[in-house]
Each structure stands twice: as structure tokens, then as C-alpha cells.
């Protein structure tokens, strides 16, 4: 399947990626190739086959809602590129 | 004899007899890293001083009566497992300065057993790749031939073990990332059953497929490391709460009564004839050792790579959404607003393969395509798992090649993503089905490159996998060969 330039640009926006001009063209070719390959799956009849999201028979794991030792605010923020007053700092959102 | 070239169990015996110390072993490994890592490029971060102080601590603990099979043994960690206070980069620019505030559970377990960490080893960025060429920092070389790839994504782990730059290593395997590099570098690599080893602190790539496991010089060492790292962990909700056996009890040379299945779908056109021959000979060896060999069929094998590249990329696109320039160290400069900051940080922070997979996964999950790709992939995953369920009604073990060829040349496949993906053709189904699989050396090509034999077992039956692997290994001498570097 050939993916269009508009589709690549749309998906890049959804994925929060900014693509350079050359990068977009390359991705059109590469993604089209991979999607064509993936379409071999369409040759399989999967009507009525239950999807597997997980191989184990897992259930929700619950625990009591009690406080436990955790990272300090300082530790949690240690890798923040910018921080202020005990919070992550990001560019202004509201005018 | 150099200490760095020995196995965990050989060094453990020497340590117990007082013939060496952890300091001597650790110095030997660190000197080896100094001598050869300029060529091999296995390490992203060498933690020499911390390793020596851990070694001294281990020697002291031994004198005080502490005993553990890995006490004082240098074990390298793939750079996608969190190590408190030590940079954990995932071989990505976006985590280039990330210093985790906590240890992954496997690291906690190793530390608790007194092993020594010489450093963090290279990988494909976010474990996405089969050659370690996708590292944002540098490519790792195969110690058997420096012009060739070590496999991937745990290429740093495999190359470091093969070159004696550590005694053993941990890797992670999402579609073959432990087994394929183990095959390329002539070492042993085990992907445990999904849920066997805690993923807490493993930087997530595809959460329903990722699993941590050991890369070692022989099967005995694999069993030893498994004894340390397995077990239920309340911090990982997918960690299986089932009893853990002593894996060293499976190390038995006799395989009488064991049935080994040979799937015809794993002996295909385009495969290197030398690989085909070595694996068939390995099967004959197992037969000679008492195993019964039968043909089995895994009819959906041909769909595995396509299924994987839908499901793994979908999960990755979701897991990697967290890298937005806010929390993990890297932020692009000069953004005009918040959205622009996200876009610029991600675009500058991720490499081409990671971007490609995020794009593919985002596409597969996007409105209008979900059923055609993601749901279809999950349905085919059911069929692939069912193939193994059926086969394991008849056999205890399945034997296949680990990869269709020995290690390829650096640069040979890097321009064609699809060709690169196809090098995982024999390992990917195992992750989709969640079963355990090991790769161990079973021969060399005429060019002196290692060839890997893959043995697969039922869910949570690592015991049979290790049993067959050990019997084969003890009947052959491939595992004793070391690269001349």
C-alpha cells in the first residue's frame, strides 16, 4: 500500500514529530514498503478469532490504599530540564 | 589463564577455594575493557571505581560468610535497565543525561546477591534493531570479525560477554534481542517466559513482548543468573506469581525420553546452507543423546514478522509518548510554545529507526486503521500462539536456527528497514507466543563466524530448554571457543 504525503504528515502530527522535507519523502517510501509487507496478513481468514493482547491469563492486581515509601520531590524532579517551586516547568500555555 | 575469560561457575569455584578474589576478577575485566573496548565498543558507560568498591565489598562479605553463586562476579547491564545514580540512556539522545532515581528489580536482585557491575552496555536505540547500529552513540562491533555487526538489540551485552569484557550480562528481548546477538557472538542467551522476570525498571519498548534475560558463556551460567533474577515482583503487574525452580537442577546430560520437534517452516529458502547444516547436525547430536526427533508444523510462522511490526510498533508509539521534553533530561531549545517544545524535543531526541516505528505504530492505531492493522495483528497473534500450543502437545522442545545467517556486515542492511526486520524471522514468534527460548553456539561458518541453535519450550518450562541446551553443550565444544581479539 502506498501511503500519501498528507497521511505521513497527519500521522507525524499525531505522534508529535516534526519531519524535515527529506525525512518525509524517505518515510513515504519506507512506510509504504513495510505496509505492503504487512498486508500479507490480509490473506489470512481471522473471522471469529479472538484477539490476543496478552499471552498470560492476567487479572487486575490490587493492593491496599496505604501510603508507602516513594521518591522525594527532589528525586522525582532531579532529571527535569527545567523546574520551579517543586514542579516541572514548561513553556507558557495560557495567554 | 586470564580471569576475564572464565565463566561464573569457574570463578565461583575459585573464589570459594580462596584461589582468587573479586577484586582480582574485576581488575582483570576492567583491564580487558581498557585493552579491547576501543575496538569492540560494547560499553556506553564504564563504572570502574564503583565496580572496584563493589568487588571489595563482595570480598569482605565472603570473609564474613556470605555465599551466592554471583558474589563478586562482574555482570554488565544493558543500558535500558535503570541503575540508581548511573546514567541509563537506552542508547538514545532523548535519555542521554537520564540518571534514574531507582534500580530496576533485576538490578536490585543482582546487587542483593553481591554481583559487581562493570558498566552499562550498548544497544539499538530503545532496543529497536537487530544490529546495534541504531545506537545514537556508536555501533558495537562483533568480536569475531570487527567489520560485522554483533546482532541486536542487546549487541553490547553479547559482544562484551564474547570479548571477555564482563563475565556475563543482562539483555532484553522483544523480538529476538537476546537470542539473535547471542547467536552472532557465539554466546548463550535466554529469553525467559513472558512474566518470569520482572520488567520493573526496564525502559518499556513493547510491554506485552519485552522480557529480560541473561547472556553468558555457557548454559550453566545461564541457569545461575536465572536463579538470581526470576521470581514474582509486586512492582510489575505482569510478573507471574508462580514458584521458581532451581534452574541448575535442569543441567542434566541425558535427554532420554525427551521429544524434540523440528518445524519445517524454519528451514527455508534463502537461509545460509552452513547454518542449515550446523543446526541439522545439532539435532542429530540431540538424537544421539537419547532424544526422539519428530517433525512438527507451525503453519503461521510466515506471518510473524508482519504481526510483530504492527503490535510492537503500536505498543512502542504509546510507550514512547512519555518522552516529551518535560521529565527526562533532554529538552530542545528555542521552542515557541508547549506543542512546539514537544515536537522539537522528540524530533531532535529520537533517531530515524525510533521515529519510523513510532510513525508506523501511530498509523496502525489511528482512526480508521485500528481494525485493519492492530486488531488483525492481535488475531494473528492468537493463531501463532495456537500453533505452539498444538506443537507442544506432541513435543517437549522445538529446535530451530536462531537466525537465517551468521552476523552480516556493518552497513549491509541499514538502508533497508524491511530487510533488517527479516533477520528476526526465527525469533519473533517466540515473543508473540510468550514462550521461553535459548540460543547457544552450534558451529561456525567457513569464515569463522558463530552459528546459533535455538531451543524453545512451553510456557514456564525453562527447565526443559536448559536441560536440552546443557546436554547438547556438554556433548560439543563450541562454547569453549573464544574470539581472538
Image (tube, coloured by chain):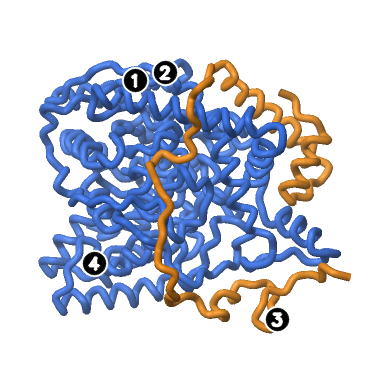
Residue bearing the label numbered 2 = B299
- Check contact, mark 4 vs mark 1: CB within 8 A: no
Who is closer to the viewer here, B478 or B303?
Answer: B303
Instruction: Compute the Cα span from label 2 to label 4.
Output: 45 Å
Name the front one of labels 1 and 3.
Answer: 3
Disc 2 and disc 4 on one polypeptide chain: yes
Left or right? Give the position of B3 relative to B204: left
Q: Which chain contains the residue that carries disc 3?
A: A
User: In this picture, is B365 found above or below B237?
Assistant: above
User: In this picture, is B44 found above or below B176?
Assistant: below
Residue bearing the label numbered 3 = A84
Left or right? Give the position of B227 relative to A78: left
x then y, percent, for residue A28: 76, 33
Residue located at (17% from left, 49% from top): B248
- Disc 1 residue crowd, few under 14, some 14–19, many 20+, Cα 10 Å: some
User: Is residue B477 in sight in this rendering?
Assistant: no
Label 2 vs 4, first from the N-terminus: 4
Instruction: Compute the Cα span from label 2 to label 3.
Output: 58 Å
Disc 3 and disc 4 on one polypeptide chain: no
- Disc 4 residue crowd, few under 14, some 14–19, many 20+, Cα 10 Å: many
Q: In which quarter of the image is residue B252?
A: top left
- Disc 2 residue crowd, few under 14, some 14–19, many 20+, Cα 10 Å: some
Q: Residue B263 carries which label?
A: 1
Label 2 vs 1, first from the N-terminus: 1
Residue bearing the label numbered 4 = B71
Amino acid at each position: 500500500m502506498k501511503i500519501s504525503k498528507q497521511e505521513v504528515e497527519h500521522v507525524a502530527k499525531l505522534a508529535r514529530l516534526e519531519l524535515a522535507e527529506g525525512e518525509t519523502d524517505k518515510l513515504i517510501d519506507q512506510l509504504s514498503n513495510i505496509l505492503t509487507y504487512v498486508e500479507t496478513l490480509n490473506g489470512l481468514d481471522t473471522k471469529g478469532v479472538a484477539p490476543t493482547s496478552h499471552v498470560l491469563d492476567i487479572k487486575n492486581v490490587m493492593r491496599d490504599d496505604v501510603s508507602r515509601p516513594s521518591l522525594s520531590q527532589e528525586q522525582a524532579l532531579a532529571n527535569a530540564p527545567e523546574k520551579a517551586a517543586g514542579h516541572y516547568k514548561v513553556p507558557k500555555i495560557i495567554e | 589463564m586470564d580471569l576475564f575469560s572464565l565463566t561464573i561457575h569457574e570463578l565461583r569455584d575459585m573464589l570459594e577455594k580462596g584461589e582468587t578474589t573479586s577484586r582480582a576478577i574485576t581488575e582483570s575485566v576492567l583491564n580487558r575493557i581498557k585493552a579491547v573496548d576501543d575496538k569492540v565498543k560494547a560499553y556506553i558507560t564504564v563504572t570502574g571505581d564503583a565496580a572496584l568498591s563493589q568487588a571489595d565489598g563482595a570480598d569482605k562479605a565472603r570473609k564474613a560468610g556470605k555465599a551466592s553463586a554471583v558474589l563478586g562476579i562482574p555482570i554488565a547491564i544493558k543500558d535500558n535497565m535503570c541503575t540508581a545514580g548511573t546514567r541509563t540512556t537506552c542508547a538514545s539522545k532523548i535519555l542521554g543525561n537520564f540518571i534514574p532515581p531507582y534500580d530496576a528489580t533485576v538490578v536490585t536482585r543482582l546487587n542483593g546477591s553481591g554481583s559487581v557491575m562493570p558498566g552499562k552496555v550498548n544497544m539499538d536505540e530503545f532496543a529497536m534493531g537487530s544490529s546495534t547500529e541504531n545506537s545514537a552513540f556508536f555501533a558495537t562491533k562483533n568480536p569475531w570479525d570487527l567489520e560485522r555487526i554483533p546482532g541486536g538489540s542487546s549487541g553490547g551485552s553479547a559482544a562484551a560477554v564474547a570479548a571477555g569484557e564482563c563475565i556475563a550480562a543482562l539483555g532484553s528481548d522483544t523480538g529476538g534481542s537476546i537470542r539473535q546477538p547471542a547467536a552472532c557472538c557465539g554466546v548463550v542467551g535466554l529469553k525467559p517466559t513472558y512474566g518470569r522476570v520482572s520488567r520493573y525498571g526496564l525502559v518499556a519498548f513493547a510491554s506485552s513482548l519485552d522480557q529480560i534475560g541473561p547472556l553468558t558463556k555457557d548454559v550453566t551460567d545461564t541457569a545461575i543468573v536465572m536463579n538470581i533474577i526470576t521470581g514474582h515482583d509486586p512492582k510489575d503487574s505482569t510478573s507471574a506469581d508462580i514458584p521458581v525452580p532451581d534452574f541448575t537442577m535442569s543441567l542434566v546430560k541425558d535427554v532420554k525420553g525427551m521429544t524434540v520437534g523440528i518445524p519445517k517452516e524454519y528451514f527455508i529458502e534463502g537461509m545460509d546452507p552452513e547454518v542449515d547444516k550446523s543446526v541439522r547436525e545439532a539435532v542429530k547430536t540431540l538424537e544421539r543423546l537419547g532424544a526422539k526427533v519428530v517433525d512438527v508444523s507451525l503453519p503461521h510462522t510466515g506471518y510473524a514478522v508482519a504481526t510483530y511490526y504492527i503490535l510492537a510498533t503500536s505498543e512502542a508509539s504509546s510507550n514512547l509518548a512519555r518522552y516529551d521534553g518535560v521529565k527526562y533530561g533532554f529538552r530542545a531549545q528555542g521552542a515557541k510554545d508547549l506543542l512546539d517544545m514537544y515536537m522539537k524535543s522528540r524530533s531532535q531526541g529520537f533517531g530515524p529507526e525510533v521515529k519510523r516505528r513510532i510513525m508506523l505504530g501511530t498509523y496502525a492505531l489511528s482512526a480508521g486503521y485500528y481494525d485493519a492493522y492492530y486488531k488483525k495483528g492481535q488475531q494473528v497473534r492468537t493463531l501463532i500462539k495456537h500453533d505452539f500450543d498444538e506443537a507442544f502437545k506432541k513435543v517437549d522442545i522445538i529446535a530451530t536456527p536462531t537466525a537465517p545467517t551468521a552476523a552480516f556486515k556493518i552497513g549491509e542492511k541499514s538502508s533497508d528497514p524491511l530487510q533488517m526486520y527479516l533477520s528476526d524471522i526465527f525469533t519473533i514468534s517466540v515473543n508473540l507466543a510468550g514462550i521461553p527460548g535459548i540460543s547457544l553456539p552450534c558451529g561456525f561458518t567457513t569464515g569463522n563466524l558463530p552459528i546459533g541453535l535455538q531451543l524453545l519450550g512451553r510456557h514456564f518450562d525453562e527447565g526443559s530448554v536448559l536441560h536440552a541446551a546443557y546436554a547438547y553443550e556438554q556433548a560439543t565444544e563450541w562454547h569453549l571457543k573464544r574470539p581472538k581479539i
